[in-house]
Image: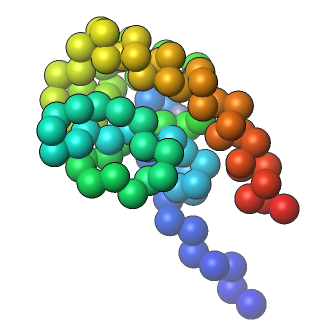
Amino acid sequence: MRPRKVPLRKCVACQEMMPKKELIRVVRTPDEEVLIDLTGKKSGRGAYLCGKLSCFKLAKKSKALDRALKQPVGDDIYDQLEADFIKIEDEFLASKELADE
Ligand SMILES: [Zn+2]
Protein backbone atom coordinates (compact mmCIF):
# COMPACT_ATOMS: atom_id res chain seq x y z
CA MET A 1 0.00 0.00 0.00
CA ARG A 2 1.19 3.47 -0.79
CA PRO A 3 1.26 5.91 2.11
CA ARG A 4 -1.52 8.47 2.09
CA LYS A 5 -0.41 11.83 0.80
CA VAL A 6 -0.17 14.33 3.62
CA PRO A 7 -0.63 17.95 2.65
CA LEU A 8 2.56 19.83 3.44
CA ARG A 9 2.92 23.46 4.35
CA LYS A 10 6.00 25.55 4.95
CA CYS A 11 6.76 27.17 8.27
CA VAL A 12 7.30 30.86 7.50
CA ALA A 13 10.01 31.11 10.17
CA CYS A 14 12.31 28.14 9.63
CA GLN A 15 11.15 27.33 6.06
CA GLU A 16 10.69 23.68 6.93
CA MET A 17 8.01 21.70 5.11
CA MET A 18 5.69 19.99 7.58
CA PRO A 19 2.36 18.17 7.56
CA LYS A 20 -0.40 20.72 7.93
CA LYS A 21 -1.58 19.37 11.27
CA GLU A 22 1.85 19.87 12.80
CA LEU A 23 1.66 23.57 12.11
CA ILE A 24 -0.18 26.47 13.67
CA ARG A 25 -2.05 28.66 11.23
CA VAL A 26 -1.99 32.41 11.55
CA VAL A 27 -4.65 34.11 9.51
CA ARG A 28 -5.23 37.62 8.28
CA THR A 29 -8.99 37.94 8.27
CA PRO A 30 -10.93 39.99 5.70
CA ASP A 31 -11.18 42.65 8.45
CA GLU A 32 -7.37 42.82 8.47
CA GLU A 33 -7.11 41.29 11.90
CA VAL A 34 -4.17 38.97 12.43
CA LEU A 35 -4.84 36.06 14.74
CA ILE A 36 -4.07 32.44 15.45
CA ASP A 37 -6.52 30.09 13.80
CA LEU A 38 -6.57 26.76 15.61
CA THR A 39 -9.44 25.41 13.54
CA GLY A 40 -7.57 26.05 10.29
CA LYS A 41 -10.86 27.04 8.74
CA LYS A 42 -11.04 30.78 9.08
CA SER A 43 -11.16 32.61 5.79
CA GLY A 44 -8.38 34.93 4.84
CA ARG A 45 -4.73 34.70 3.94
CA GLY A 46 -2.93 32.16 6.08
CA ALA A 47 0.62 31.63 7.18
CA TYR A 48 1.94 28.57 8.96
CA LEU A 49 4.32 28.21 11.87
CA CYS A 50 5.66 25.14 13.64
CA GLY A 51 4.00 24.81 17.01
CA LYS A 52 7.17 25.94 18.70
CA LEU A 53 7.70 29.20 20.51
CA SER A 54 11.24 29.36 19.17
CA CYS A 55 9.85 29.50 15.64
CA PHE A 56 7.40 32.20 16.60
CA LYS A 57 10.22 34.25 18.05
CA LEU A 58 12.18 33.79 14.86
CA ALA A 59 9.18 34.93 12.82
CA LYS A 60 8.82 37.97 15.04
CA LYS A 61 12.47 38.87 14.70
CA SER A 62 12.57 38.45 10.94
CA LYS A 63 9.07 39.86 10.39
CA ALA A 64 8.25 36.68 8.50
CA LEU A 65 4.53 37.12 9.12
CA ASP A 66 4.55 40.54 7.48
CA ARG A 67 5.84 38.96 4.31
CA ALA A 68 3.67 35.86 4.44
CA LEU A 69 0.49 37.82 5.11
CA LYS A 70 1.44 40.67 2.80
CA GLN A 71 0.56 43.17 5.46
CA PRO A 72 2.65 45.00 8.04
CA VAL A 73 2.14 43.32 11.40
CA GLY A 74 2.73 45.74 14.25
CA ASP A 75 4.83 44.93 17.29
CA ASP A 76 1.71 44.97 19.45
CA ILE A 77 0.12 42.34 17.19
CA TYR A 78 3.24 40.19 17.43
CA ASP A 79 3.13 40.55 21.21
CA GLN A 80 -0.54 39.55 21.28
CA LEU A 81 0.11 36.58 19.01
CA GLU A 82 3.05 35.52 21.16
CA ALA A 83 0.88 35.57 24.28
CA ASP A 84 -1.78 33.51 22.47
CA PHE A 85 0.89 31.20 21.13
CA ILE A 86 2.19 30.47 24.64
CA LYS A 87 -1.37 29.80 25.82
CA ILE A 88 -2.15 27.33 23.06
CA GLU A 89 1.24 25.67 22.80
CA ASP A 90 0.48 23.03 25.45
CA GLU A 91 -2.99 22.43 24.09
CA PHE A 92 -1.58 22.15 20.59
CA LEU A 93 1.09 19.64 21.62
CA ALA A 94 -1.47 17.60 23.57
CA SER A 95 -3.87 17.43 20.65
CA LYS A 96 -1.03 16.39 18.38
CA GLU A 97 -0.24 13.46 20.66
CA LEU A 98 -3.88 12.44 20.65
CA ALA A 99 -4.01 12.61 16.87
CA ASP A 100 -0.98 10.34 16.60
CA GLU A 101 -2.63 7.51 18.48
ZN1 LIG B 1 9.38 26.50 12.05
The quarter holding residue 64 reads top left
Query: Quarter of the image containing the N terminus?
Result: bottom right
Q: Is residue 15 visible?
A: no
Query: Quarter of the image containing the C terminus?
Result: bottom right
Indicate whether 56 appears above or below 17: above
Whether residue 9 sits left or right of residue 67 in the image: it is right
Indicate whether 19 appears above or below 34: below
| Farthest-out residue, bottom | 1
Q: Could you tell me which residue is drawn at 59 percent across and 21 percent down?
A: 86
Q: Could you tell me which residue is drawn at 40 percent across and 16 percent down?
A: 80
Q: Is residue 27 visible?
A: yes
Q: Could you tell me which residue is drawn at 48 percent across and 52 percent down?
A: 39
Indicate whether 96 appears above or below 1: above
Indicate whether 7 appears above or below 1: above
Q: How many numbered marks appear? A: 0
Whether residue 98 sits left or right of residue 54 in the image: it is right
The quarter holding residue 72 reads top left
Q: Position of residue 7 (x, y in %)?
A: 50, 65
Q: Could you tell me which residue is drawn at 79 percent across and 49 percent down?
A: 97
Camera-side residue of 79 and 58:
79
